[in-house]
Image (cartoon, grey):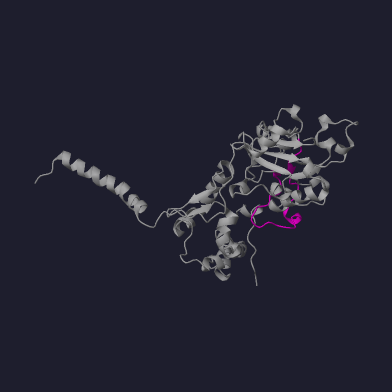
Amino acid sequence: MSDKSKVIYLLVIFCAVAAFPFLYNSLSTPVNAKIELNTPVIDAMKVKQCIVPKEEMRRDHMKILNRWRDEVVRDSHREFGNIDGVMYEKSLQRTCMHCHSNKSEFCDRCHAYASVDVYCWDCHLAPKENKP
Amino acid sequence: MSTGRRQFLKAAGVTGLLGLVGSPLLKIFAPGELEASSEFREGAALTARRWSLVVDMKAFPTEESYTKCIEACNYTHNIPRMDNEKHEVKWIWPETYEHAFPDNYDVYLSENIESMTFLVLCNHCDNPPCVRVCPTKATFKREDGIVAMDYHRCIGCRFCMAACPYGARSFNWRDPRPFTKNVNPLYPTRTKGVVEKCNFCADRLYRGEQPACVEASGGALIFGDLKDKDSNVRNILRTKFAITRKPDRGTLPRVYYIIGGS
């Protein structure tokens, strides 16, 4: 069996290639998926409450944004009243980003972690962030 | 005491009903809740059955007077200033009489008209050809007459640009962001590959404000409801002779021009 050494070499190379992603992930620093909620506007709020409960927002924000988009653009329904009767303008730039003025620490962190590529910012402008 | 079948069903029904409506009812009638806050925007929305615009040319004596309107629009909507004329994006722009009213042009017209500069924009037609040709319904007509665009749906086919007889539509050949110097942070930009045009400032109307160009015009542009017989635009059109651009195209434009006379 003269091919024995060849087989062993190839087997070692195969194992190294197959194990590479696992090794790479275990050695590299993990992606920070923790979103930052402390912006000046949110810090100044007496009751820190988003337009709908946090869990619902976390799960359904993309659906809410899509629904808002269609209602505002096509039906001219620009007002949103939440369960407590507080009224908001359905606007990404004027309402969402007014409080969450930290796109890079709020939107981007989680989207990067989940590998979600959104095209909101092709047109919509993110608030200016003062980066150190 | 034994419970009959009838009694049991009744009790079950009442309990079920209470469970369904009880807690929402309690929430509605609880004191202090459901107070709609009205401070989230300044004025009440401006509404109309048919928005239209009247351009009073006598009130535009100088270049400065109409440049102010164009600049107000450019800032409000983040219109880019392209360095290549072929990539130009415009919502409201100056035009000569010959170009604005080619059907009525004649070489022997008054010199006064030759030197005039006309502000032209989307006519928000009653019979808009751009809406008819749009394959994705990205351009559509709102109930108040505004021909609006949904940039999320635009695929950039430019059928609407071919259909519009007024050249009121611009295509984004390039990413407009680097060419937008003075940015209004409260309004989006557009992206490469979509068509854009004037929207009669639909979002400003919602906040109770006049369109940006009208506000900057100092009374030279008059914006109002064409279906209200006592509105400002109807009163002007009743007393002064006004023309529209290319009326023979059958698009029923809703931007009127008062050129002279009283």
Label total for image: 0
Task: Give the left or right position of residue A58, taking residue A107 as reference.
Answer: left
Q: Which of A46 and B45 is in front in this view?
A: B45
Query: x and y percent of residue B168 in the render?
Result: 74, 40
Where is residue B39? Give x, y as percent. Answer: 52, 56
Residue at image point 60% right, 62% down: A103
Outermost left residue: B1
Q: Indicate whether B152 appears above or below A52.
A: above
User: Residue A80 at what x, y percent from top left?
Assistant: 50, 50
Q: Is the magenta stretch mostly helix, strand or loop?
A: loop
Q: Position of residue B141 (x, y in %)?
A: 62, 36
Q: Choose top left, top right, bottom left or bottom right for residue A98.
A: bottom right
Residue B181 counted in the magenta span: yes
Instruction: Answer whether residue B178 is magenta in the image.
Output: yes
Q: Nearer the viewer, residue A57 or B60?
A: B60
Which residues lie in the magenta part? B166-195
In the figure, B204 relative to B247: above or below? below
Q: Is residue A39 visible?
A: no
Which quarter of the figure is the C terminus of chain B placed in? top right
User: Where is B25 relative to B100, above or below?
Assistant: below
Q: Which residue lies furthest to the bottom in this view?
A: A132
- The reply to whether residue A78 is visible in this rendering is yes
- Which residue corresponds to the image point at 77% horizontal and 44% vertical from the top-left? B59
Q: Residue at x 85, y 35 (%)?
A: B98
